[in-house]
Amino acid sequence: MRFHQRILQKTAAALRSVPFWKRQRYRLEYFGLGAASALVCLLPWRWIGPLASFVGSVFFSFDRHRRKVTLDNLRCAFGDRFSQPELMALGRKSYGVFARTALELLWSSNLSREVLDEIITTEGLDPMPAHGAGGKPAIYFCLHAGNFEWLSQITCRHFGTFPVIAQNLKNPLLGPLFDSWRSSLGQQIMPQKGAMLRTLRHLKDGGKMGMLIDLNLKPSDGPVVIRQFGQFLTPVTRLPAELALRTGAALVPVECLPRPDGGYIVRYLPELPVAPDTKIEQIVQACWDALEPGLHEHPELWLWSYKHWRYKPEGMAGQGYPFYASCYGPYQELLLDQGLV
């Protein structure tokens, strides 16, 4: 009851700050998404996988632009490894994986520790590694692959709850909904404003955090450029490396892989060694290198419809990039600063 009261209070405050017609659109999106969650929560969990495969297949068939992005990303990343029919099949499966992630996020109100224990098998925690000890700061990082939305909840199942940074959405009414789904097992929601200082304090106090590392950032966001799939120079976040160097937190790669019966295998890979004098660029590259092999093993799990490689180097170095990639002055300067061109 208190949760719904807080939702209503945030909704009313947000509605007063936007124009009338946008207010109505936001209201429809809010109630529509809430109704969708209520319906999905009525389904048995084992129905979600088949439903997601159907939904993903439908969207893959009709979403021409994103389908083109998906297929070109796959073609550029893997070269001649897959035939055109195989690329189509991988793209379709990738849509299904993302649809399942979205539907399971809507289903999160049904999550409990017992449900997670049935759905999830963990690897790499027996015996418990050093990073799992109480009072040892750790950053568990992953890609947008498999059910990345549930990874923080699964990690909290084994290491205790940790803060989840609230996401700023264009529709401010949707924030409380996503916060409730992402904190269904008791995680604290950390406001995005001032999150860096709170995160530093949390890790210095021996806390643990989860983080996604594969989004393409603008050059103005202060990224680090790494090499993906042996060729794509990609600007990504430097945050895990900086936090590890400043707090001594362990850096632990995490994968979410399919289980034959429809559940998930969550695999905690070995902690990355980080010496105090290691360069940030080397740490960020090592984070990616720890997880890229999983994409070669299960390419359908990644979010291929995302424009991962928006920028490309000038000249011959820019060959082999997807159709949507373009040269950009500040990106070229970033490459020069890191000595990559």
Image: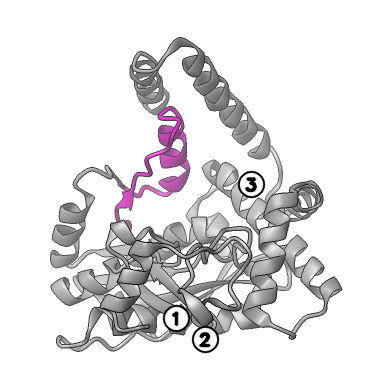
Residue 185 as seen in the image, left or right of residue 24:
left
Q: Amino acid at mark 2?
A: Gly
CA–CA distance in space, label 3 to label 1: 32 Å
Q: Are dots 1 and 2 in contact, CB under 8 Å?
A: yes
Secondary element under disc 1, as helix, strand or loop, is strand
Residue at image point 45% right, 83% down: 290
CA–CA distance in space, label 3 to label 2: 33 Å
Q: Quadrant of residue 328?
A: bottom left
Q: Amino acid at mark 3?
A: Leu
Q: Is residue 131 something that shows in the picture?
A: no
Q: Amino acid at mark 1?
A: Arg
N-term mark: 3 or 1: 3
Residue 103 as seen in the image, left or right of residue 192:
right
Query: In x, y percent, where is residue 282?
Result: 30, 85
Q: Residues within 10 Å of mark 1 (few under 14, many from 20)?
A: some
Residue at image point 47% right, 16% down: 23
Residue at image point 51% right, 19% down: 27
Say if the magenta span includes residue 181: yes
In this rendering, the answer to whether 94 lies above or below 244 is above
Residue beneath disc 3? 103
Which residue sits furthest top? 20
Residue beneath disc 2? 230
Q: What's drawn in magenta, residue-wise?
A: 160-188
Nearer the observer, 318 or 64 = 318
| Quadrant into which the C terminus falls | bottom left
Q: How is the image coloured?
A: one colour
Observer-side mark, 3 or 1, equals 1
